[in-house]
Image (cartoon, coloured by chain):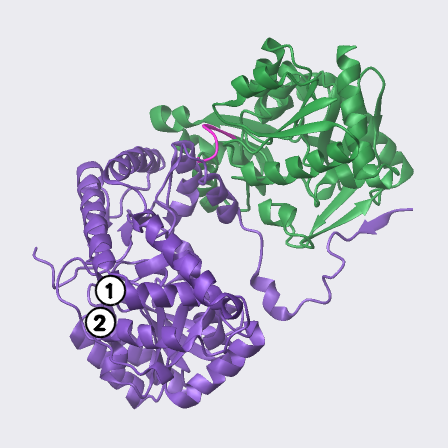
Chain colours: A green, B purple
Amino acid sequence: MRIGVLMGGRSLERDISLRSGRRVSRALTELGHEVTELDVDERLVPALKEMRPDLVYIALHGKFGEDGTVQELLEILDIPYTGPGVFSSQLGFNKALSKEILKRQGIPTPPFFVLSEDTFQEMGAVHALSVAAEKLGFPLVVKPVAQGSALGVRVVHEEDDLPEAVRFALHYDSRVLLEKYVRGTEVAASILGNRDIEALPLVEVVPKSGFFDFDSRYTLGATDYYCPARLDEETTRRVVDISLRTHRALECQNVSRVDIIVDEQGVPQVLELNISPGMTESSLLPLAAEAAGLDFNRLVEKLVGLAMEKYA
Amino acid sequence: MSRKYVLDPFGEKYAHRTASMLSSEIRDLLEVTARPDIISLAGGLPYTQALDPEVLLRLARRVLSEDFASSLQYGPTDGYAPLKRSLAEVMHAEGSPCLPEDIVITHGAQQGLEIIGKIFINPGDHIITEAPSYVGALNSFLSYQPHIHAIPMDGEGMDVERLRAVLEGLAAAGEPAKFIYTIPNFQNPAGITMSTERRFALLELAEEFDCLVVEDNPYGLLRFEGSPCPTLRSLDESRVVYLGTLSKIFAAGMRIGWVAAPHPILEKVLLAKQSADLCTSSFTQRIAHLYFAEEDWIGQVKQLREIYRERRDAMLEALQEFLGDIAAWTRPQGGLFVWVTLPEYIHTSEMLASAIEAKVAFVPGSGFFPYRGGENCMRLNFSYSDADTLWEGIKRLSRVVKREVSLARAFGLEKSPAPRPPRDPQEED
């Protein structure tokens, strides 16, 4: 097949995306495809029109690549692409919206509030922070609503540090999420499939710094991973069940990665869903696939197969 | 059965000094700035386009036709002898007389820094730098695990009163400082030049407390305003280790720098260099030699000064126009950088993500401090972009800064006063 691999772009996760993309394109070449790497810029559409690929592999992370933007463009151009469609991408990248949907479907997710920059600039929302914090309790996590790789995320232990953390997150998106911090075991469930979906073995994440931030994610050796996660059978079953429900609730196809905390009572709570999981050497989806006996090339092949099936 | 996946199976084998070498969010963010639609004021790149390609082609051809085999061969560790003579002339031109035998050629001044770390620093040793200081020097030194004492600067360079206090404290504790590292001219990142008086004072302190001075002088010849100050080496050859480079006056890609030092130190430098890389490239050393021996390199430096002065002026004018009421900045008399100080409530490393979104980039100040400091500062480069681009870049930056101010207001933080820049007494006010 003629496959264009979209990577790079101008998102803050450009570098991560380039790492994912190069790895994917090497795999696709080894699998015998005719591969063109496309670093996304204003020449993308003309390049795609000229190339007329059979499939586009989206190895983009973050804004424009993961939020439905590029997906919409590919829909217009009638080019098949990997990963979930426009709607799921929009939902997945917006942590506020996806959490709201999960809540409505009865899928446990930590309690949260969302505040926009405007509420601070125009309505004095800074004076609501302590009220919100009181309702959620400390510690709490402050995140930009739409951003990946834990960029702009901070754990806050006391009220004095809260405004600073909110201001920090506002550099990464114009909306922030205040979420109750749940202590427990952090696991990632990678889901594959279209009509029939399956979860790969769960990956348990144990960052040495105690917090799975950007540096812990991308410095080899900064985090320990266990696969399958060290959970009992019953808990594992519950986690898998919840992640499959999450994948369906956001109407995902092909692939997604659901990040979950199993709290101290053994209840899995969904933190977020990623529609373009990382494919770097330290990423969770390839690790889970490997544990399932699927090496990196076969994982890529499977993702391509699932994408084509969607258009069959 | 659950298995522990070890992504780096060599984790137990690394030396302790690698502990400070981590992936960094800032570094990844700056990766984005290589995109052409982003105006990057972040780099430290000299303007190599000012060189004449015909000249370089001619020189490269001559090296290959006249000196083919030896230009592709290993060479002496201390450097290609004819080039050492040229470098002695370069030092002479900046008022720092020097003999070729006082020089060891290195792979850029960066290798000189690395070697200085290697031959002088034991873990736990005390060394002194300016605050802020060149990040490449800090990283080279930090990998040898010293305690770094960063001394603040005012408009005349390192604060010698503070320096004295630190040197006294260390001496009293029986752990005297090994060396003082300084970039006296148009300092990277601050753009400040150490006054002549201060140079004497610093050398007196070095003598009193018996420590070495490492003088890093990459930009000395790029002075486009005011009169030159004597190099520290020219004032006291006996305790100054001097680092020079052709990167800013010729071409960074040649990777040619040098160390000039007292002979016992030079011998250690030579041995350390030998184990690091045997020798600097024979090929580029020959090209550089022909360039400095036969071409009008002084004319080229004059041209660079003109270009850089024009660009500095454009940047300062834009700063005045767009950020005059919010920020303070240094007014460099040469070199490549302006140091901008914003109100204390603005954290430039946090602001970087918004800036990239607005298609402009800078280097956050905190990276230029060994431990803490400079959170509200940033380094801007003016050498690499033309005047119009600089103007547009500062305009974009000002929008980002203004949003910071209004955000800070919304968070009730904008109480701290507008910053004052370090003043250079030489400048007309």
Identify the residue shown where x is 8% and y is 55%.
B429
Identify the residue position indicated by label 2 in the image: B93
Identify the residue position indicated by label 1 in the image: B221
Q: Is disc 2 surrounded by few (<14), some (14 to 19) or many (20+) residues within 10 Å?
A: few
Please provide percent x and percent y for residue A279. Answer: 70, 37
- View extreme (front): residue: B65
Overall secondary structure of the magenta stretch? loop
Badge 2: chain ID: B
Identify the residue shown where x is 29% and y is 53%.
B337
Residue A174 included in the magenta stretch of the image: yes
Q: Amino acid at mark 1?
A: Leu
Q: Which residues are magenta?
A: A171-176
Instruction: Pick whichever of labels 2 and 1 is earlier in the sequence.
Output: 2
- View extreme (left): residue: B428
CB of mark 2 within 8 Å of CB of mark 1? yes
Identify the residue shown where x is 52% and y is 17%.
A46
Of badges 2 and 1, nearer the viewer stands 2
Q: Is disc 1 surrounded by few (<14), some (14 to 19) or many (20+) residues within 10 Å?
A: many
